[in-house]
Structures are given as C-alpha cells and as structure tokens.
Image: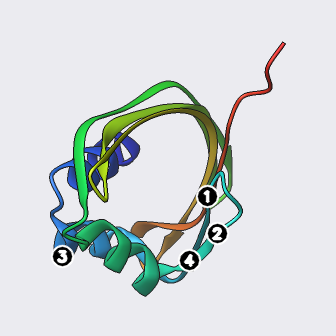
Amino acid sequence: MLEMQLTDLYKERKVDRLAALLDEDFVITFEDGNVYSKTGYISYNAAASLRILEAETLEVRVHLHGNTAVLTGVYHERGNENGKPYDYRDRFTDVWMKKDGKWRMIASHYATPAKD
C-alpha cells in the first residue's frame, strides 16, 4: 500500500522518492496548525535537526471515490527535533488521486486525538 511506503520513505528520509509520491499541489496541515506545500514538507523532512526513530501508520481505512481515495487512520511518530525528544500519536486524513495512471497524495491533515 502506498500509504505504508510513504511512511517508510519519510522515516528513512528518502526525500527524492517521497517527493515522487506527492502531487505538485500537495498541501499538509500539521497538529500545530502549520501548513506546508510539497516543497516545504520535503524541506522539513530533510532538515538536519529532525531525527525520526519510529514512524508507523495503523488502523488505515480506505474510501474510494472514482480516481480519489480518502484514507483515515492512526499515526505514531517518535524522535528528536532540535535535540528534544517527541512522541506524537495522531489521527490523520490523507487524500490520494490517480493522475496520468499514477496515485499521488494531494492533501494530508494530522490532528491529535481528543482527550477524555
């Protein structure tokens, strides 16, 4: 599944291969409200200050609508950024679209789960 491949490429910081899965108009919204374009997201992933120790995508549900797929699930990431440890557990929604015979991610949104 491309979603799992994308997570692995992100963790391994294989930015060229990661970029190939993202549409030119790709946009991502992070938990803190920051929004990045494809270029911004790739730059973020390539930053020397980011060290990803663990990244996993769980409970993925796929909803197909013609040439568009909406995926929802749980994302877990652990690592260090600017020398400080972090451990995120989020819900995500990713939108993929088949263009010219290839699936490309066009949008992604992450949100922290609501606390009880």
Near-viewer residue (18 or 31): 31
| Mark 1 touches mark 2? (CB < 8 Å) | yes
| Mark 3 touches mark 4? (CB < 8 Å) | no
| Mark 2 touches mark 4? (CB < 8 Å) | yes
Image coordinates of residue 32 in percent, x first then y, are 67, 56
* Residue found at the very far front of the displayed protein: 83
Quadrant in which the C terminus appears? top right
Question: On the image, which quarter does residue 18 sit in?
Answer: bottom left
Q: Does 25 appear above or below 77?
A: below
Residue under label 4, please give it: 36
Residue under label 3, please give it: 16
Q: CA distance from mark 4 to mark 1?
A: 8 Å
Image coordinates of residue 101 in percent, x first then y, are 40, 72
Q: Nearer the viewer, mark 3 or mark 4?
A: 4
Task: Please give the count of numbered marks on the rendered protein.
Answer: 4
Q: Nearer the viewer, mark 3 or mark 2?
A: 2
Which label number is shown at residue 34?
2
Question: On the image, which quarter does residue 25 sit in?
Answer: bottom right
Q: Does 94 appear above or below 38?
A: above
